[in-house]
Image: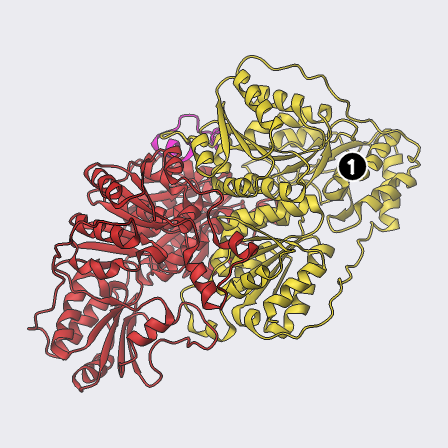
Chain colours: A red, B yellow
Amino acid sequence: MNGADKLCDVLLVNGVDVCFANPGTSEMHFVAALDRKPEMRCVLGLFEGVVTAAADGYARMAGKPASTLLHTGPGLANGLANLHNARRASTPMINVVGDHATYHLQYDAPLTSDIDSLARPMSKWVGRAQDAASIRKVTEEAYVSAMARRGVSTMILPADAAWGEAQPEDLSPVSVPAAEPASEDAIAEAARALTGGKKVVLLLAGDALREDALEHAGRIAVKTGAQLYSQTSARSARGAGRVPVRPVPYPVDMAVAALSEFEVAICIGKGQPVAFFAYPGKPSLILPPQCAVIDLGDAASDLRGTLERLCDAVGANGAKPVYGVRADFTEPTGQLSPETIGLAVARRMPENAILCDESVTSGRGFGQLAPGCAPHDHLPLTGGAIGIGIPLSVGAAVACPDRKVILLQADGSGMYTVQGLWTQAREQLDVVTIIFSNRSYAILQGEMRNVGVNQFGKNARAMLDLDRPELDWCQIARGMGVEAGRATTIEEFTRLLDVALLGVGPFLIEAMI
Amino acid sequence: MNGADKLCDVLLVNGVDVCFANPGTSEMHFVAALDRKPEMRCVLGLFEGVVTAAADGYARMAGKPASTLLHTGPGLANGLANLHNARRASTPMINVVGDHATYHLQYDAPLTSDIDSLARPMSKWVGRAQDAASIRKVTEEAYVSAMARRGVSTMILPADAAWGEAQPEDLSPVSVPAAEPASEDAIAEAARALTGGKKVVLLLAGDALREDALEHAGRIAVKTGAQLYSQTSARSARGAGRVPVRPVPYPVDMAVAALSEFEVAICIGKGQPVAFFAYPGKPSLILPPQCAVIDLGDAASDLRGTLERLCDAVGANGAKPVYGVRADFTEPTGQLSPETIGLAVARRMPENAILCDESVTSGRGFGQLAPGCAPHDHLPLTGGAIGIGIPLSVGAAVACPDRKVILLQADGSGMYTVQGLWTQAREQLDVVTIIFSNRSYAILQGEMRNVGVNQFGKNARAMLDLDRPELDWCQIARGMGVEAGRATTIEEFTRLLDVALLGVGPFLIEAMI
């Protein structure tokens, strides 16, 4: 056996059995090793941004990492933007990045680059196998870091470490340190704040937004009067029968207004909220300056355990949370718009669906409808690096073949990783992609107005409009093997959505809003 | 005026008047400033890999840098693979990467990342404007480095440096140090080798492959019996009336065989050739171990001057070079294949065309036909990071609106930056894109056989085949506004090529080889 075989074996024994890949010459021995392991599922992306976001979507739903296979520095570079999103989602992932043979690096061959420098900004762990003998140790470290620290591990695999001779050995799963809840002191401090008559907000993130954790948060809220807000996170349980949580709004002014009344913020899963961007004369921090902040742990800690203990500490175990209640959404009529599309989707949300969301400006209103929908999981864009949606849906669908995936996708960001549609088709994934076709970077047009520009000249239009020519998403989708239909009215949209939801396999609806 | 206005003014006064862009919120003040400068041509790419390769293609043809506009770390990350190619092409370029306001960085907002770490591997120069007052100095440094050192400059522009107040001032072009030829000693050594009865190869790269430099190389070859080989470079003058140069072959064994006879290698524009990849039991260096190497300068030196002096030193000024002679290529018949496509293109090559080449395996034979074609410039993939072709054609066409651009494009690599087709359409660029549709990563299938795997199992097929489903390039192109036609026979192909060459504006031919 060679080093690449050993790498596959270590991944498999630890339950990592999906590899999102786009290989190159320096990874041929790894490809050959994967080919000897039919229990590994290899999924090709036609661009590495597809590969990394698919691995993100997979891990969000599977609760364990996928591996990726990336080709040297440029292959990693192509995947970095979605690794940035995965980093912000605290997603476990194991990147395997092929590199030249160790002795070949000194010659600075054309594909040589500083992979370590590229990997570090988006990875919690970066390591390099020096030879075949070190592969077990390095792979296990990558796995443990991904799971225990909840993040991206990037393992660099020189070609000679892959093709070098390795010794067969008995392998067993490596042990991962258990996550810890917040300290007793911190929980006691939070309990005092909750029961001390102050206006308290629980800011939930990470696993605090999973169904069981939300139960505890809901009891605390009912018992103490605290309010529940969420920060953008990998995966949130939403819909009827789940405890509804309001998101901290994206626009700074709205966010500041929403949280202005609070005297204490208890942050569970992520630090206090920060403005997405800085603007002249606007604050960077969202909470009021005098608001006290209690930190009850980050994404890598045991957030369910923390909420359970906090629930206990405030005597809320017997409280009955307020749940989302299934709404009888009326069939929308009138214009095709983000609002009517939202209503149509909410009305038809399949039980236990996965809602991937890169709708940017078009989907902002949907969150309000979520508590009235059938229960579903919400997977949003986490790091602001656009181009996550299509491949995120790929990964979620690979992880959960029995669940319908609905993707709310803005057109501008959808084009970033449009190649992911092909993987939807190749793997026959059960994804309904809804393109909000507004033919512009609408969010940026709003931001231009924010900086005081209301009349757009030639260059602003050149950079912010997506018309001239208009994208034809149906042709693009069909060109990649995905069935598609265009809607110009809400009636056409609902007909297409019914067709898409009844069928199995990928379908794209181009909504001309 | 603000810092962003100053940045635009410094770029424009130095002749940088094209900006390939994909902006985000942190760059809105820069977008607004660009909008106040209609003399700047802003060209939108729907993905940053398009932006950076377009800037590369532009500079290769314009001989001066374009600027780019990239949105924070992820926007830069998306452009890095083609910056890697630009680095290997020694292309001058000025990236402007927006970042959060300086005071906002400490809060680690979602889009925050270590831009410097991401930029360094692919940039010769990385700098950060601290405030509006420093923008002139930083921009001038970026420009001087790009021009004098022939490479990528990456300038990080915090939002508050862009929106901060700047003082109006008189600007003038900054002076760029002139490139130096090789030293007299080195030239004398090379001259002795050339006239000493040894078997000598001149390995040309960079500007040594431009028409005037080739004249000198051709005289030296005729006078001394030295042979001319080229290493992959940004731009080569090819075709009838130009001095033909053989490329060092890509496959290691062929490359070693081609250069095995030489006793002295004179390297002009780049160091000695290196194997693209390492393989077990094969060498990393291409030249025979006993071959002496004389280094006459890199891409940033005055290669024309060096060749002129060397020509003088060997007394070759009166020699008449051997030129490529226009061949009477016969109209191809039979199967549609890379060979018949090559013949059809060679026969029809427009005078003074620009041939962008990311044909990978399919185009390898074309180089042999090049000396018999009408004179043209050849712009290849330089750094092995696939996904350069479509946007490279965009940049070349923006730089040279009066010249026909022909793009030879492999299908697998074409998908990487397929979004560039939209920019071809928006800017109505005169580009004929020829897709070699072989529905596979053919180069990797060959490399798998190189590592001894001849029977592909499920996972190898999953990662190396592009069928199931087959891409329909015509639909994809039309979906982005580019006219397209499919050829399944060589007769269909030539008919489509004739149509495409007669017209003006983008046209894509999907060749089903």
* B89, A277: nearer the viewer: A277
Give the vertical position of A105 relative to B280 (above or below). Answer: below
Magenta-colored stretch includes residue B464: yes
* B314, A262: nearer the viewer: A262
Magenta-colored stretch includes residue B511: no
* A282, A182: nearer the viewer: A282
Question: Horizontal placement of B296 versus A145: left or right?
Answer: right
Give the vertical position of B412 relative to B328 (above or below). Answer: below
Quadrant in which residue B274 is drawn: top right
Crowdedness near tag 1: few (<14), some (14–19) or many (≥20) residues, C-alpha within 10 Å: some
What residue range appears in magenta? B444-466
Question: Horizontal placement of B464 versus A267: left or right?
Answer: right
Quadrant in which residue B222 is drawn: top right
Residue B52 in view of the camera: yes
Q: Please, what is the dominant secondary structure of the magenta stretch?
A: helix
Amino acid type at circle 1 is Glu
Residue A157 position within the rendered picture, expressed as x and y whole percent measured from the top left: 46, 48
**Residue picked out by circle 1:** B211
Which residue is pictured at 58% across the width and 24% down the height?
A: B499
Residue B385 position within the rendered picture, expressed as x and y whole percent measured from the top left: 55, 43
Question: Horizontal placement of A479 versus B185: left or right?
Answer: left
Residue B112 position within the rendered picture, expressed as x and y whole percent measured from the top left: 45, 65
Q: Residue furthest left?
A: A318
Where's the N terminus of chain B, which quadrant?
Answer: bottom right
Residue A389 position within the rendered picture, expressed as x and y whole percent measured from the top left: 35, 50
Residue B359 in view of the camera: no
Which residue is pictured at 82% across the width and 26% down the height?
A: B322
